[in-house]
Amino acid sequence: MGDPAVRRLRVGIGAHGGTGMVAFAFFAVATWRVTHLLVEEDGPADVVLRMRRRAGSSALGQAMDCFYCASLWVALPFAVELTREPSPNAPSWSGGTSRRMRLLESVATWCALSGAACLLERVYESGVSGAAFDEPIVPHPEWNVAADPRCSVVESVA
């Protein structure tokens, strides 16, 4: 049956309401984190580094050298969990979708999780720091904001 917390999160991409996207975002970040650990980091006590060295140039070793390749394999169990059939006593959100549709949804979820992890990796590699949020918000001159002595930003615009 699985962990109740995961069961509450797992509602699938096609779920009604916004919870499906929350679960997807949760698993996308988890996919990025595990993939980044396997490909870019040495891990605690160099465990991942030793695993990578032992794998050498095998298929596993090659997958651990490529973020994009590794993210596909890391995303697979998360996609299976996201799209797995709910327990019989759980409310049905899928409306009785066909087996073929469930398979397509599973594959699409798998690819989407990997793709989201790849996008997160590109943002991480670019070094985006949140500098856009470091700048003060300056009101537009047409807003007719009266100067407030407690606010130096407004004073500089007024």
Image (spheres, rainbow, N blue to C red):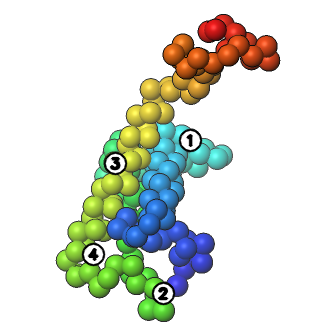
Q: CA distance from mark 2 to mark 1?
A: 41 Å
At mark 1, the secondary structure is loop
Q: CA distance from mark 4 to mark 1?
A: 37 Å
Horizontal side of 155 relative to 22 (left or right) equals right
Dot 1: within a 10 Å radius of its alpha carbon, few (fewer than 14), some, or many (20 or more) residues? some
Residue drawn at the location 40% of the way across and 34% of the way down? 122
Amino acid found under the numbered disc labelled 4: Arg
Horizontal side of 67 relative to 26 (left or right) equals left
Which residue bears the numbered disc 2? 90
Q: CA distance from mark 3 to mark 2?
A: 30 Å
Instruction: Name the residue nearer the viewer: 54 or 99.
Output: 99
Task: Mark 2 vs mark 1: give the one in front.
Answer: 2
User: Tag 4 or tag 2, which sits nearer the N-term?
Assistant: 2
In the displayed structure, 117 sits above or below 23; it is: above
Residue drawn at the location 79% of the way across and 13% of the way down? 149
Which residue bears the numbered disc 3? 115
In the displayed structure, 17 sits above or below 98; it is: above
**Residue closest to the far left:** 100
Dot 2: within a 10 Å radius of its alpha carbon, few (fewer than 14), some, or many (20 or more) residues? few
Dot 4: within a 10 Å radius of its alpha carbon, few (fewer than 14), some, or many (20 or more) residues? some
Tell me if label 3 and label 1 are in contact, CB under 8 Å.
no
Q: Answer with the quarter of the image where residue 74 lies.
A: bottom left
Q: Answer with the quarter of the image where residue 153 lies.
A: top right
Which residue bears the numbered disc 4? 102
Amino acid found under the numbered disc labelled 2: Ala
Amino acid found under the numbered disc labelled 3: Gly
